Image: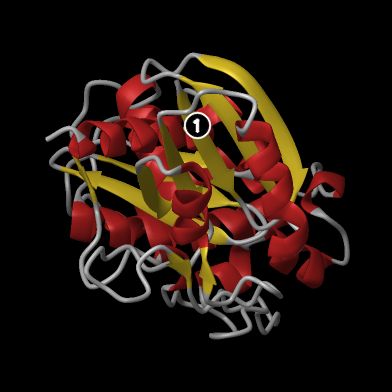
């Protein structure tokens, strides 16, 4: 029996299941402070004979096992979580193998195993919600190097008619600062869900996301792009993304039909938690080698 944690900036989703993606039980816990949130997570898992736990976490995080701060959340602006020793706490509490990566890398793993990119050794999973993050599977492996990808903070060209200055606390008008949910609300004065019929909102959103996808495609050449997160529940943004992407690329690279290449998660809202269970299974398998 495996435990999975999808640790988001707004909520933790915890589940017990197996490596086939079957979920036996789950719970949702608000992300407040470690002192409030983590004891509730531990209490949930204590009810089950867990053999390993997989954690897909908001970041930035330290994913290098040889690092003295491996398993920590590092420079997050979320109050209380900066330098939090995530992995160590669960190792001390449960004494089982712990798999650890970003929430979006976990979601990419879940989608490549059971979802929209099933059977592919390459895909890109992007979440557009409170923030913007992306995880990638490259040649069957989750992408990481010096650190893990932080694709939500790339710079994009500002639309000539967009006066909004951006709201990323680090970079101002990076992709996240211009296109995440809080940026939509900051620019238009209402949440995205209240702007469904405003075509200009989704045209501008598509303009910024398409720029990012162009860069990801030219650098990583993923076999499938999966767009999740709360903002992407507004399906009217997908045609805008495809239209702008086609204009930006100018047929420079050959791609499949864009409406089939750029898709919603096949696992719906379960991509991240399914990936967390797979991280747990990987950790368990490695511990037996």
Lateral position of residue 123 relative to residue 219, left or right: right
Quadrant the N terminus occupies: top left
In front of the other: 79 or 93: 93
Residue 209 position (above or below residue 269) = below
Image coordinates for residue 126, horizontal then vertical, percent: 46, 49
**Location of residue 184 by image quarter:** bottom right
Q: Is residue 144 above or below residue 147?
A: above
Q: Is residue 20 left or right of residue 86?
A: left
Residue 120: image x %, image y %? 21, 28
Q: Nearer the viewer, residue 227 or 28?
A: 28
Q: Position of residue 212 (x, y in %)?
A: 41, 61
Asked where in the image residue 225 lies, by quadrant, the reply is top left
Q: Which residue is mark 1?
A: 3
In the image, residue 104 above or below residue 182: above
State whether residue 85 is above or below residue 264. below
Mark 1 lies on a secondary structure that is strand
Give me the residue at 66% from left, 76% from top.
Answer: 162
Which quadrant of the rendered structure holds the C terminus? Answer: top left
Q: Is residue 265 visible?
A: no
The one nearer the camera, 157 or 143, is: 143
Q: Residue at x 31, y 25 (%)?
A: 113
Residue 34: x and y in percent read: 69, 62
Tell how many labels.
1
Name the residue: 39% across, 25% down. 116
């Amino acid at each position: 029996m495996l435990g999975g944690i999808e640790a988001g900036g707004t909520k933790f989703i915890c589940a017990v299941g197996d490596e086939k993606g079957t979920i036996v039980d789950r719970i949702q816990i608000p992300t407040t402070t470690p002192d409030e949130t983590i004891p509730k997570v531990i209490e949930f898992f204590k009810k089950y004979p867990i053999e390993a736990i997989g954690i897909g976490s908001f970041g930035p995080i330290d994913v290098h096992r040889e690092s003295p701060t491996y398993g920590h959340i590092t420079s997050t602006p979320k109050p209380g979580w900066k330098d939090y020793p995530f992995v160590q706490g669960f190792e001390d509490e449960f004494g089982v193998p712990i798999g650890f990566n970003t929430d979006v890398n976990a979601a990419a793993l879940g989608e490549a195993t059971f979802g929209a990119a099933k059977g592919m050794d390459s895909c890109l999973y992007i979440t557009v919600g409170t923030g913007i993050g992306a995880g990638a599977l490259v040649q069957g492996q989750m992408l990481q190097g010096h650190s893990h990808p932080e694709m939500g903070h790339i710079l994009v060209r500002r639309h000539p008619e967009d006066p909004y200055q951006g709201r990323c606390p680090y970079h101002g008008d990076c992709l996240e600062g211009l296109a995440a949910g809080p940026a939509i609300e900051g620019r238009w004065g209402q949440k995205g869900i209240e702007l469904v019929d405003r075509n200009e909102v989704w045209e501008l959103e598509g303009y910024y996301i398409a720029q990012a996808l162009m860069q990801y495609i030219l650098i990583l050449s993923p076999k499938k792009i999966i767009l999740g997160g709360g903002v992407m529940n507004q399906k009217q943004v997908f045609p805008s993304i495809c239209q702008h992407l086609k204009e930006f690329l100018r047929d420079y690279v050959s791609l499949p039909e864009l409406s089939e290449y750029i898709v919603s998660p096949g696992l719906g809202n379960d991509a991240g938690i399914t990936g967390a269970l797979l991280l747990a299974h990987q950790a368990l398998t490695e511990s037996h080698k």
